[in-house]
Image (tube, rainbow, N blue to C red):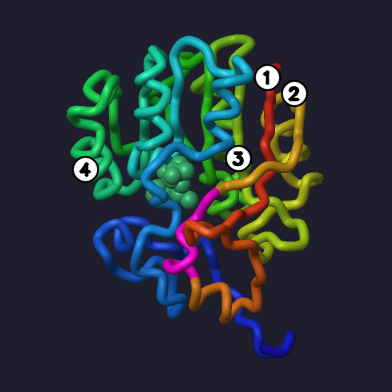
Amino acid sequence: MSESAQKSYDYATADFNAVYRGGELLGDTGITRVPWDVGEPQPGVIEFERRGRIRGDVLDAGCGLGDNAVFLAARGYRVTAVDAASTAIERAVERAAGRPGGADIEFAVADATSLTEYAGRFDTLLDSALFHTLDADGRRRYAAALRRAGRPGAWLDMLCFAAVPGGMPEPLSVSEQTVRQVLTDAGWTVTELTQAVYWGVAEATRTFLEKTGTQVEIDDKGRTQLPVWSVLAERS
Ligand SMILES: C[S@@+](CC[C@H](N)C(=O)[O-])C[C@H]1O[C@@H](n2cnc3c(N)ncnc32)[C@H](O)[C@@H]1O
């Protein structure tokens, strides 16, 4: 597809409830299957935990179908998992039932750009691929809301699509400078920012990738290997 024929989308209009019910996520992208439902925790989240970057009361913001939350709960963390899409929470509760730690997770429908009911509650704020789905104003409000939900000295662990070659198109992906700026302005001190990989379901996004002229790596299990910023920050 030539450069001029590439389509762009208003990502802030994504209908998450729809895709969790088998409907269209976004315009004519053909995404009717949950693209991030790889059925297991994300490697970046496993790495946060392996490195000792999770502690105490954890908020999984934009938890989706809950595989990251279950992974952490099974390792003994007290996990609250919220998502704005009520269908995601219904399905996450079902999926977590009967899995180790699953019954201990506090699932709730909540808008992560406000989180007023969670003020001062958490030691660790986990974001696995929510930040980049928001528009510029939403990202600012979200960063402030996460800070509000954190206790003094709380940690933020974030995976966010990176605007680098082989990644998702902007503004769905975000520059390193923007991530640093938004978090710093909201009162976070970024202590580490490196590149990592977020898995997706290649088949779910095939049409979208074609229409946007996006070329990403796909592994032998049919998973997109999407570049993300792996960000560690502290509540300053
Ligand atoms: C790309 S998915 C990632 C899901 C999950 N964290 C994962 O890695 O599998 C982004 C999630 O954020 C949720 N979301 C979007 N905007 C939100 C908001 N304002 N508040 C809470 N959740 C939101 C969506 O419903 C969706 O489940």
Q: Which residues are magenta?
A: 199-205
Q: Secondary structure at mark 3?
A: strand
Q: Which residue is mark 3?
A: 159
The amino acid type, in three-letter code, at marker 2 is: Thr
Q: Is the CB of the residue bearing disc 3 within 8 angstroms of ligand 1? A: yes
16 is within the stretch colored magenta: no
Q: Write down the residue under mark 1.
A: 234
Residue 172 at x, y = what percent?
61, 59
Mark 1 surroundings within 10 Å by alpha-carbon count, few (fewer than 14), some (14 through 19), many (20 or more): many
| Amino acid tagged 1 | Glu
Instruction: Tell me the quadrant of the picture where the N terminus can be found.
Output: bottom right
Viewer-closest of 153 and 45 = 45
**Residue, disc 2:** 189
| Front disc: 4 or 2 | 4
Look at the image and say whether residue 200 sits in the magenta stretch. Answer: yes
Q: Residues within 10 Å of mark 3 (few under 14, many from 20)?
A: many
Q: Secondary structure at mark 4?
A: helix
